[in-house]
Image (spheres, rainbow, N blue to C red):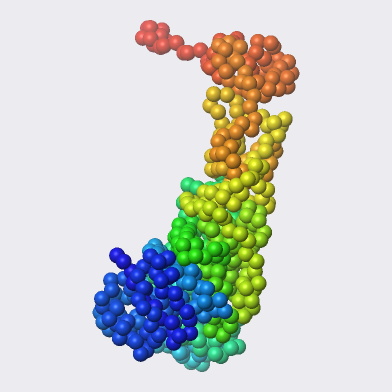
Amino acid sequence: MSSKLLLCDCEGTQSLDLDQISSACEMSCSKVHTALCTRELGVAAEMLKTEDQLVIACGQETVVFSDLADDLGVDQPGFVDLRDRAGWSEQGQDAAPKMAALAAEAILPQPITSAVDVISEGTCCIIGPGEIAYDLAGQLSDSLAVTVLVTDQAQPLSRSFDVIRAKVRNLTGSLGGFTWQLDQVQQLEPGGRGNFAWSAPRDRASSRCDIVVDLTGGTPLVTAPDKREGYLRVDPRDAVAVARAAFDAVQLVGTFEKPLYVRLDEALCAHSRAGQTGCSNCLDICPTGAIIPAGDYVAIDPMICAGCGECSALCPSTAITYEDPPVSAVLSRMHILARTFRRAGGVAPRLLVHDAHGSQMIRMAARFGRGLPADVIPLELNGVSGFGHAEMLAGLAHGFARVDVLMGPKTERDALDRELVLAQAIAGQGALSLIDEVDPDALADLLYAHDAPQPLADPVLPLGNRRQITRLAAQALNPDAEAPLSLPAGAPYGAVVVNTDSCTLCLSCVSLCPSGALIDNPDKPQLNFQQDACLQCGICRTICPEQAIALVPQLDLSDKALSQQVLNEEEPLECVECGAAFGVRSTVERIMEKLSGTHPMFATSDQARMIQMCDDCRVNAQFHSTDNPFQSAPRPRVVTTDDYFTKRKDH
C-alpha cells in the first residue's frame, strides 16, 4: 500500500524541498501547504477521505487531525514532525536529507508490545499520621474503599473508612496487587462512649489492596517509589501534593494495560550453577527490585518492572531481551534513517538518541533557539537506559558518523555509563558520548560544536541478538584488527586462561559452564574452549578446585574465536590389564606416588597395581582377591524335612 506525505511549511517558516524528499523516502508527496491545521483544513479532510495511508508532516497539531479523522469516520493518519526536528534550524535550508530520512522512518511498521490487563477495584490503603490521613480518607471514601493505617495515636471521628494500627514488616506488589505483611495489628472497636478502643495486638497479619498512599514522609516502603505504579508517596507537609495525590488515586480505578517490557529465556541465564553464583548484573542494576534469584536462574516480576531496560543492556547471554521495542526494531529504524539520509545526498549523519523529555528539549530549541544541526538525526525511544553497547556500535556500523545519547532527569544512567566505556573500547573514543544536559540552548550549542568523524565508507547491516550484533559491528569498525581488542573489566566477552601446571583436567568447569564455551573431549583428556561463546560469568573460575582458571576480557574478531581451541590436554593412561585408555596419566601417576606402599589398601604391589586399572578391571581384580570387599557371608544351607524330624524329641 503506497503512502502519501502531506506537507505544510507552517506559515512559511521552514523550507521544504518537495522533489528531494519524495525521491529519497520513496513516497509521493503533496504540494507544500501553508496552514493545513487552520485555513487549509479542508484539504486535509479531502486527503483523509481519498488516501489509504496518509502521513501528515506535523507534530504539533496531531489532536486536530485525529479529531478530524474521527469526525469523518476514516482511519487515523500517521504523523511525522519535520518542522521541530529539521525545518526550524539555523541549517534548515540544508535539512532536506534529514527530512527524507524522518519521513521514511515514519512509515516503517513497528511491532506492538505485548501487555497484560491490570485490574484495580479501588481498594486503597493510606498510611501516615492521623491528622492528615483521616482528612484525605474522608475525601476519598466516597470513591474508594479506604483503610487508614495510622502511625500515631490520633483518634478518628468518622466511620466512613476503616482504621487500623500496625507495624509494617513488608510491602510488595504494585497497582492492583499490593500485599502488606503486618505485626502488632490493632483494629478499631467502634462500640462504647468516648474515644474508640483498640483490639489486642496480633502478629503475622497480611492484607491486600490496589492503591497505596504513603503520607509517612520517611523512608519509602518500596524500592524506586517513583517507578512503582499504584504507589503514591507524598510529603505530608505539602498540602498541594496531598491534594494532587487524592486526584491521582481516584484515577487509578479500572482496567489498565501493563506492557511486558522484557522477556526472559531461563535456558540462557548464567546466574548460577550448582550453588555457584556467576552473573548477577541484572540483580545488581534493577532499580525497582523486580528481579530476584530463583535457583540457577533469575525471575522477573512484570508487574513491578518499570521498563528501564538496564537489565537487557547488561545481560551477557541475551537471556533478558527488551521488547518495547525489541532490538531488531531499533536497528531497522537506524538502518532506514541512515540509508535514506545518504540517498537524499547527505554525507555524514549523526544520531541523537533521546526519550520523551529529549523531544521536548528539541522542540524548545527549535522554537526559541538554534534548533538541531542539519546532520543530527533524532531517534526517540520510550527509554534510553537500555540503549547498550550493541546498539551504539550498530549505529556506527549503519553509517552514522557518531552516536550521542541524550539523558533525561529520570534516566537510569548506571548501565549507560558501563555500556559507553565498553562501546568506546571497541569503536574508539570520538564517535560515542552521553549528553547530560537540561538546557535546550546548551544542547543545541553542544551539538553544533561536536566534531563528526568520518563514517564507515561501506556500512553494514548487523543482525541477530546483541552478541552477534556487537561482533558484526566491531568487525566493520575494526577491519584491520589482528590482535584481540582489550576490554574493561566486567565485559561480557573474553577468553579463559588455564594454568596447565595446576590443572588436573577434572572438568568441573565444563560441567557447570552455562554457555557451553568450555567443552571436553570424550575420546581423550582434553579441555577445549570457544571464545565467542564465553560470557565471562566467572563460574568456571569459582568452581575450579585448583584455582587454575583466569578470565581475560577481550574481543577476538578473527574466525579463531568461533572454533574450539585446546586449553589443556594430556595423554590418557592405558589399563595394565586390558589396555583400554582411561583417566589422565599424570593424575594417576601422582596418586600412585602418594598411595603406593603407604596406604593400607595399596600396601602390596598387587594392590597398588589396581590403581592403574580401568573401572571394569579393577572391580574384577578386587572380586578375585583373597580379601574380596564384595564377598558376603556364606549362603545358609537349605533346611530339609530330615532336619525337622532330627530336632523332634519324640522321633
- Residue 9: x percent and y percent? 43, 82
Give above or below for 469 relative to 430: above
Disc tally is: 0
Q: Which of 335 and 646 is in front in this view?
A: 335
Could you tell whether 508 is left or right of 269 in the image? right
Could you tell whether 520 is left or right of 108 in the image? right
Could you tell whether 72 is left or right of 588 in the image? left
- Residue 412: x percent and y percent? 59, 67
Q: Which residue is drawn at 52% across and 70% down?
A: 378
Q: Looking at the rendering, which quadrant does residue 615 occupy?
A: top right
Q: Looking at the rendering, which quadrant does residue 51 occupy?
A: bottom left
Tell me, yes or no, if residue 208 can be seen here: no
- Residue 203: x percent and y percent? 54, 69
Q: Looking at the rendering, which quadrant does residue 626 occupy?
A: top right
Give above or below for 646 relative to 270: above
Give above or below for 416 relative to 485: below
- Residue 363: x percent and y percent? 52, 80
Q: In which quarter of the image is the C terminus?
A: top left
Could you tell whether 154 is left or right of 463 in the image? right
Q: Which residue is drawn at 67% across and 38% down?
A: 497
Q: Nearer the viewer, residue 153 or 256?
A: 256
Q: Residue at x 60, y 33 (%)?
A: 565
Q: Which residue is drawn at 60% across and 22% down?
A: 583
Give above or below for 261 relative to 646: below
Q: In which quarter of the image is the N terminus?
A: bottom left
Tell me, yes or no, if residue 496 can be seen here: yes
